[in-house]
Image (cartoon, grey):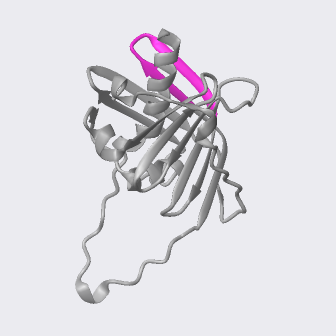
């Protein structure tokens, strides 16, 4: 049972890790404003390495992140043999965590998540994290935050990303998974 709870918390931590990333926006005069052109439409990051530390427990896994700008981000967590054990699907409105190992899922809005998360998180931060558009420009993200009474650290090592490549994202049918009571972990 402890491992199951840790997997959920670790997975949630991975999803919520972007809370430490913040972009600085330069001030411009109204006459200088140019229409923004997105730098990419799709982003694929394969073979990234994520390590979540909570207390004395550490979980490390290979992850793949697929992002469609301003629409959807999917994180596949593959702790062993390249098999997807956990999947995180984030939209601008909600986050769905699917635990394939235990055949269950949880769904939460950012407001639900931010009740226990410090600092808070939103879709823009999630998109930055999943597309490696970190304000620091580093190939490594190290984020520490509080989730309730627990301190959780996430480290992601990013390999080169692929932009505007065809990606295939299929939503998992949630009907084959049991809905988890997220109030136990939120």
- Residue 76 is at least partly visible in this image: no
Q: Residue 20 placed where, x, y %?
A: 35, 42
Q: Residue 22 placed where, x, y %?
A: 33, 51
Which residue ends up furthest to the bottom in the rendered image?
A: 31
120 versus 81 height, above or below: below
Q: Residue at x 39, y 30 (%)?
A: 182
Range shown magenta: 50-62
Q: Residue at x 34, y 28 (%)?
A: 183
- Magenta segment includes 10: no
Q: Nearer the viewer, residue 175 or 5?
A: 175
- Residue 180 is at least partly visible in this image: yes
17 versus 91 height, above or below: above
Which residue ends up furthest to the right in the rendered image?
A: 81
Q: Residue 104 placed where, x, y %?
A: 55, 28
Q: Nearer the viewer, residue 109 or 61?
A: 109
Q: Nearer the viewer, residue 112 or 18?
A: 112
160 on left or right of 2? right
Q: Residue at x 24, y 72 (%)?
A: 27
- Magenta segment includes 58: yes
On the image, which quarter does residue 31 sit in?
bottom left
Q: Residue 142 placed where, x, y %?
A: 43, 35
Which residue ends up furthest to the front in the rendered image?
A: 175
**Predominant secondary structure in magenta?**
strand
Quadrant location of the C terminus in the rendered image: top left
On the image, which quarter does residue 99 sit in?
top right
How many marks are shown on the rendered structure? 0
Q: Residue at x 42, y 38 (%)?
A: 17
């Amino acid at each position: 049972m402890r491992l199951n709870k840790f997997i959920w918390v670790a997975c949630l931590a991975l999803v919520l890790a972007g809370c430490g990333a913040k972009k600085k926006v330069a001030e411009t005069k109204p006459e200088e404003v140019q229409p923004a052109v997105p730098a990419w439409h799709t982003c694929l990051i394969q073979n990234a390495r994520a390590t979540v530390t909570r207390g004395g427990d550490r979980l490390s896994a290979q992850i793949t992140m697929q992002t469609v700008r301003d629409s959807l981000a999917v994180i596949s967590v593959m702790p062993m043999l390249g098999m997807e054990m956990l999947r995180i699907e984030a939209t601008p409105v909600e986050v769905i965590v699917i635990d394939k190992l235990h055949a269950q899922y949880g769904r939460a809005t950012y407001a639900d998540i931010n009740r226990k998360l410090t600092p808070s998180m939103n879709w823009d931060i999630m998109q930055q994290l999943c597309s490696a558009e970190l304000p620091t420009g580093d190939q490594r993200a190290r984020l520490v935050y509080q989730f309730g009474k627990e301190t959780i650290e996430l480290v992601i090592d990013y390999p080169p990303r692929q932009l505007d490549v065809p990606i295939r994202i299929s939503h998992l049918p949630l009907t084959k998974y049991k809905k988890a009571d997220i109030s136990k972990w939120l």
